[in-house]
């Protein structure tokens, strides 16, 4: 729970010393141009977490379809690495309740995963 100012007080001084030893004073002046304000660090953390979320969403697909009787089906396709190969397969196909809200899809998938444990 440290504040984002730790970058200015701990990380930046250590980086300056490393750059000074390895590359000299000219490189240190270039390093000083990098912004380390609270807002910059917070924004970078948000960008990184957003990127991670997008990557995860691209690996786990949740789709809704209807069968020939008109009942909504939740088809869950998973993509994972198995023995250094990327595998994509159907995890489950479950009937959704009448309402088809996001919470309903979550509940159906959650029940399935709890049952598999």
Image: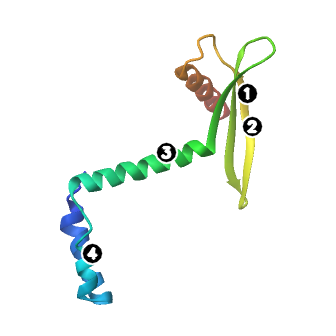
Q: Nearer the viewer, mark 4 or mark 2?
A: 4
Residue 22's place in the image compared with 111, above or below, is: below
Q: For the point 67% across and 50% down, which residue is it?
A: 80
From mark 3 to mark 4, how far is it between C-alphas? 30 Å
Q: Nearer the viewer, mark 1 or mark 3?
A: 3
From mark 4 to mark 2, how far is it between C-alphas? 49 Å
Which class describes the residues within 10 Å of circle 2: few (<14), some (14-19), or many (20+)? few
- Residue 69 as seen in the image, left or right of residue 60: right
Q: Is residue 79 in view from this perspective?
A: yes
Location of residue 77 (image quadrant): top right
From mark 4 to mark 1, how far is it between C-alphas? 53 Å
Residue 51's place in the image compared with 26, above or below, is: above
From mark 2 to mark 3, how far is it between C-alphas? 21 Å
Q: Which mark is residue 31?
A: 4
Q: For the point 56% across and 26% down, which residue is it?
A: 106
Q: Secondary structure beneath disc 1? A: strand
- The residue wearing badge 2 is 90
Q: For the point 63% across and 10% down, which residue is it?
A: 98
Location of residue 17 (image quadrant): bottom left
From mark 2 to mark 1, how far is it between C-alphas? 8 Å
Q: Secondary structure beneath disc 2? A: strand
Q: Secondary structure beneath disc 4? A: helix
Q: Which is nearer the N-term, disc 2 or disc 3?
A: 3
Residue 108's place in the image compared with 54, above or below, is: above
- The residue wearing badge 3 is 53
Q: Which is nearer the N-term, disc 4 or disc 2?
A: 4
Q: Position of residue 102 (x, y in %)?
A: 54, 23
Q: Assess whether mark 1 and mark 2 are in contact (beta carbons under 8 angstroms).
A: yes
- The residue wearing badge 1 is 93
- Pick the residue in front: 58 or 3: 58
């Amino acid at each position: 729970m440290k504040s984002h100012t730790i970058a200015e007080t701990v990380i930046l001084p250590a980086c300056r010393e490393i750059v000074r030893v390895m590359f000299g004073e000219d490189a240190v002046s270039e390093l000083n141009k990098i912004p380390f304000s609270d807002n910059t660090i917070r924004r970078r953390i948000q960008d990184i977490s957003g990127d991670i979320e997008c990557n995860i969403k691209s690996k786990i697909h949740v789709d809704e379809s209807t069968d020939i009787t008109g009942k909504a089906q939740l088809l869950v396709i998973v993509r994972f690495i198995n023995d250094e190969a990327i595998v994509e397969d159907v995890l489950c196909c479950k009937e959704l309740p009448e309402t088809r809200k996001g919470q309903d899809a979550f509940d159906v998938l959650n029940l399935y995963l709890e049952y598999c444990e």
